[in-house]
Every structure is written in C-alpha cells, then in structure tokens.
Amino acid sequence: MKIFSLGIEQLTINEMKLAGFTVITQNVLPEPAHAEGQLLLVTSEQVPVSALTELSRRFVKSIILYLYLQRGVRGYQAVHMLCESLGIFFIPPRSTASAIIEKLRYIMEEEREERSSLVGFFGSGPGIGCTSVAKLFARRIAAAGFRVILLGLDLYDPGYDRKTAVSLDRLRPRITGKMLNGEDFEGFVKQDGYLYLPGNFDYLSVHDYQEEEIAYLLAEAHLHADVVVADFGSVPESAAWYTGMQRSALRMMVTHPRHEYRLQALMELAGHMDLHPQDFQWIVNRSNVEEMTSPKSLALRFGCEILLELPHYQPLLDNLPLGKKELQHVDDKVHALLVSLGLAVEVRKKGIFQ
C-alpha cells in the first residue's frame, strides 16, 4: 500500500521510508482516483478541521490518517471525536516520527481483527480446576456490572454435573446450520449473574466438532455479551482448544507446579501458533499443596508471570469458597482484565495507576 503524504516534514518521511513504507510526497491533494485503495496522510496545516467532512467524502475509497498539529489550550478531543465519526484515523499533537510509524503499522496490518473480548481458560491437565476458575472469573466480571456469557467448550467434559435442557451438544444443530439468535443465548443456564452454556455431554461426538463451528459460536456470543469467557479444557486434540488458542484476547493457563512437564509440552505446541509463555496469564490452582517445585520456580522456569494463586479446597467446589481478602485480590485482577479489554478505565490508588 502506498502512502500519499501532504504536509509531513522531510525527516519524518525519511523515517517512514526507512521503516519500509512507500511514501509519495504531495504538494497538493492527489486525485481521488489515484489514491483509491491507498493511504492518505495529511496534516491540519494543509487540511483544516472544517474541511475534514469534505475530505472524507472525496476520498471515500482511501484510508485517511489525520495529523493534528495545533497545540492550543482548548485541547484536541473534539477533533479526535470528529475524526472517529468520519472514519478517519487520528494522530494527536506532539506525536514523534516513531509514534506515527507505529500508527501506520497498526492501520496497515493485513490481518488486523476487531478488538476481541474473549477470555479463554486452558488447563495443563484434566481435573486441574479450569472450569471452576473460569466460573470464578465469570462471576466476578458479572458482579462488576458486565453482561457475561460463559461457554463450556471443553469437549471432553461438560463441566456440569446435571443434565440440562441446553448444552453444547444439544445446541450443535443450530451451530452447524448457523442459525443462532438472541433467544438461544437467553436460554442458557442463568448462574451467579452470568449466562452459562454447559459443555458437551455426547462423548462420541468429540472428534466431529469443526473449528469453524466453534468460531461461529464465539462470534455470535460476542454479539450478545460484553465479555465472553470460555472454558476450553486441557486436551489439545480438541477443535475448540485450537480455536480458542487462536482467537482469545486473553489466555488463562490454569496449572499447578507438579504439571511442569505437561506445561513444557503445551508451550511447545503453542509455539507452533506463535504463542509463548508470556502470551498467557498463569493461574496456579491449589498453590498451598506442598510440592517440590514452587509457583515462583515454575514462573522462572518458563519466563512467565503468575497472575493469581488460589489455595486448595477440599472438596473442590463448583464455586470456590474464597475469603474476603482472596476475593478482593481476584477482583483486582478482574479490573486489570477489564482495563486491558477496553471495558474499564485505570484508577489511581495511592498515587499509582492500576
């Protein structure tokens, strides 16, 4: 893709070229036909704010990037809002050449996807508590005031002890036929403030599921929830597991220090999808059970950070009986999760942004 540049200083243009972009310097706006399918980069000195509406109409088949240079006391938020309404990308005043280049890379990324709100939970082995932890997060996100759908996508374990009127296998004909609608989601099990789809009870159909079916279900769930939480289980053989690895905005790995050898194999498999330990949020379940390897040693071994450590409960209940202090710690992590998804704002606490 070519970049038609109007009003950009030469030093910035040189930096853009060094970064690998094809830049065509203009003294006047190009003809719309010449810029069709290309990117038009203009400054507020060449195109005033009052002319942005006409610019968007003329170059409807081009990507427009607007560099606003005025540093007045009135700020630039109103101009940014106007650009958003017109479908124009915006760069604020005082932006460096590096910032402009990063914006260009974002815009021109060939396979850029819309922002996802899918939080995927993966286990390092059967029985590790992946479903219980996914329900814990779904419950606390819902308690924060968001509409949450929890999908049971561990095809080897329904994650629910009772047979229900709705489950993944019972819903499958509508998924395969791509006929899901709002009534289907409203029919999910209402549990602790969120909507829950129990997983697959039909063990004979495990290998019949296709990745495109799971992708369709996830896409439809996004239309009916602020946050989609999915329990993808711990068996990489599953089509749901692979789809979740590829599509999750946040990947939660529920594990235990004794699973070090399992994690090694899982991380090698994830590496084939260009995912690495730092691409996962690690949750150590039953962390107070004495083991030769500590959670800290596990983190150092893989070069990752532990998001959360949950103590062992006996018996392991569907809803983890967390104490007040533990629940506050979980809520702090949930808030950080919501901020990363763009659903909450950072808050200042004791002089530090969280």
Image (cartoon, rainbow, N blue to C red):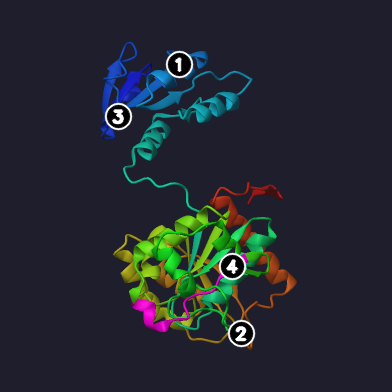
Residue type highlighted by circle 4: Phe
* Distance from Cα at disc 2 to Cα at disc 4: 24 Å
Position of 233 with respect to 307 (left or right) is: left
With respect to residue 340, does 297 lie above or below? below
Q: Mark 4 vs mark 1: give the one in front.
A: 4
The reply to whether the C-beta atoms of the residues labelled 4 and 1 are less than 8 Å apart is no
Residue 47: quadrant of the picture: top left
Q: Earlier in the sequence, mark 3 or mark 4?
A: 3
Residue type highlighted by circle 2: Leu
Q: Which mark, residue 37?
A: 3
Q: Earlier in the sequence, mark 2 or mark 4?
A: 4
Residue at x 56%, y 57% (from the top left corner): 182
Residue at x 60%, y 62% (from the top left corner): 186
Q: Which mark, residue 316?
A: 2
Q: Which residue is mark 4?
A: 188
Q: Which residue is mark 1?
A: 54
Q: Secondary structure at mark 2?
A: loop
* Distance from Cα at disc 2 to Cα at disc 3: 57 Å
Q: Earlier in the sequence, mark 2 or mark 3?
A: 3
Position of 8 with respect to 344 (left or right) is: left
Residue type highlighted by circle 1: Glu
The percent coordinates of residue 320 (x first, y second) are 65, 77
Residue 140: quadrant of the picture: bottom right
The reply to whether the C-beta atoms of the residues labelled 2 and 3 are less than 8 Å apart is no
Q: Earlier in the sequence, mark 3 or mark 1?
A: 3
State which region is magenta: 195-207
Q: Mark 3 vs mark 4: give the one in front.
A: 4
The percent coordinates of residue 280 (x first, y second) are 45, 64
